[in-house]
Amino acid sequence: MRTDLLRRSTILAGSLLLLVALAGASVCVGAQAVAPAEVLKAFTDYTGSAEHIIVRDIRGPRTILAVCVGAALGTAGALVQTLTRNPLAEPGILGVTGGAGFAITVGAALGLAGSQITQLLLAFAGSVIAALVVHSVGRSSPLRLVLAGTALSSLLAGISLGLRLLMPTVFDEFRFWYIGSLAGREQSPFLIPLVLLLLALVGAMAVTRPLNALALGEQVASTLGAHILRTRLAVLVLITVLAATATAVAGPIAFVGLIVPHLARRPAGGSIPWLMAYTMVLSPVLLLVSDILSRVLLPTGEVPVAVVTAFLGGPVLIWAVRRYGTVTL
Amino acid sequence: MTSLVLRAGRFSARAERRTVVVSSALVVVALALGLLGLCYGAAWATPGEALAALAGQGDSVVVIREWRLPRVTAALVFGAALGVAGAVFQNLTRNALGSPDIIGLDAGAYTGALLVTVLLSGGAATLAAGSIAGGLLAAAAIYLLSWKAGVSGLRLIVIGIAMNAILTALNNWIVLRAELEVAIAMTSWSAGSLNGVDWADITPGLTVLAVLFLLMAALSQAMHQSVLGDEFAASTGVNLNVLRPLVVLVGVGCTATVTAVAGPIVFVALAAPQIGRRLAGAAGVPFVPAALSGAVLLLAADLAAQMLLAPTSLPVGVMTTAVGGTYFIWLLFKETKKS
């Protein structure tokens, strides 16, 4: 038991180190490379040089965003997978992020998405409605749920495309957002979404204990004193806040919530608190790697980060389908 | 059920009466919509004028014969091709959701076309060859990946969805890397559009499709036998090991050819075979009603895309996504309620 704890803590510490190293790399790499020593100076000995401005005003905030959005998407994925016992579930695949994105697009078309608060509210409403539709259409099997989510996402994406083509001027500022990208997102204030995400992440850690009990079955859970209905409701609220806020900030990014919980499940060994902890550390790692790749994959300009995650996530979905097929967790 | 049998020497064709009636009705609808397509445009031509122009008389011969006729022809033939492709894969997977655009064959064809354009910068023929090769490779990859002691329809479809995500990401990256002119041409194409097609664009595609339709007509009887079960097909003299690859070739060829010319037009291949099947009241997914429904669907969608926000013309792909996507979700919902 003791060595088990030691092993798990070591893996967590290693993951944290990896995260810190990648966050550093994310600040250094880009159109203009900045030396690591210069990055440190930007915080300790700020001179206002071009490099210092890049570090403090562009790449630093962008890295913070990537860490928080990544953690949110991964945690939402781990929560959905645990709650529905469906190894293929993920907010992007289930159409939750698609619903949030669509609601913001429609809001913008109606002239409602001006402020950040309304954007967040629209995203919440959109993701809740999308989740309800997908659940009622595809609840009979994990594979069917994936089909329903994909169909809804592509339907909403099609309508969004139509709206964008109709009102090009309205959507000019959303051009990169709708594909799912972190580029330039650090320029708009992100304090409110960040606080929301951090609160929801703390909440996700708090529900792991009752979720652990729930994983043993409803009867055992209620014998152990867990409030089943309250737990389910809390988890649903958390998933919505995490997925919708992440989408409002960075646009629809799929597959992060699918890949990381599958990686984290083996070292966690059936413990949901550990699964959540690993997911929270490793998801930002994945998004940072994808974001760094998105900056270096093109000779000029950037690939949207969602393109990178889709390319990495597709093979994981194929693997998961072959491994788990129609079974539930 | 009453059926009609036509004989001409060695050849004979047999069809259910209802299928014949439905097919004739669909042909009439398609022709009526086609006439509407010839009349509608920046300047309205009366049906009389349009028909006269087709015969080479009147002032609007160029507008009707060189601008509107290729677009109407493309919508009808491409729609039929998508209907056939959908029927092929729905028959093979025995699942109403098995459609080439859902499982990533469109995306694969697009990848092939992109690679050919970027690397070889070839003409229409190489573009068609590239997209067919891309579609076939994607089909082979999906089939191999979903093989696990046999192929289950639903597993194949979800693996196809994953493949679609990977290939779409790859396509985005290639477009972003490409030279600016190529990128602009490719982006407008990627929505799936018939805006501004002319005879030079569609003639190679029409030729390829004609060959594929003939091949499919030759195979359709054997295909219907195979739908009744593998043993039945084998005992009535159908060689499945020859039939299946040929049929896949036709299905992928149809999808890829349409994709090469007009871009990925989604959901027609999904909806048309099911609509045709319900109209004809047939078992399995019959090909002729599927093709005719596809033709009617795509032409109607293209007309709606032109009229809805005139004078702006939406890509027809946006229209088919909106209508077909709703239909797809409804189909899933009905299946879930049943089970």
Image (cartoon, rainbow, N blue to C red):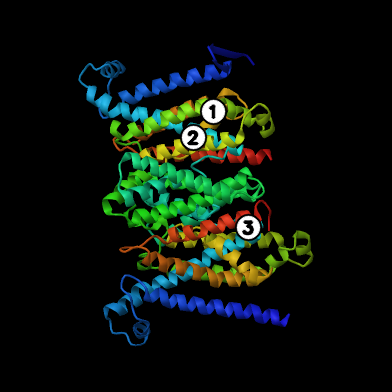
- As drawn, the residue found furthest toward the left would be B59
Question: In this figure, which residue is indicated by the disc labeled 2?
Answer: B250
Tag on residue A89?
Answer: none
Instruction: Tell whether label 1 touches label 2 (CB within 8 Å).
Output: yes
Question: In this figure, which residue is indicated by the disc labeled 3?
Answer: A87
Question: In this figure, which residue is indicated by the disc labeled 1?
Answer: B219
Q: From mark 2 to mark 3, how far is it between C-alphas?
A: 35 Å
Instruction: Tell whether label 1 touches label 3 (CB within 8 Å).
Output: no
- Density class for disc 3 (Cα within 10 Å; few <14, some 14-19, many ≥20) is many
Q: Position of residue A113 (x, y in %)?
A: 39, 55
Q: Is residue A298 above or below residue B98?
A: below
From the viewer's perspective, tell me whether residue A261 is left or right of residue B106: right
Say which label, 2 or 1, has the lower sequence index. 1
Do tags 2 and 1 sit on the same chain?
Answer: yes
Q: Position of residue A5 (x, y in %)?
A: 68, 80
Amino acid residing under circle 2:
Val
- Density class for disc 1 (Cα within 10 Å; few <14, some 14-19, many ≥20) is some
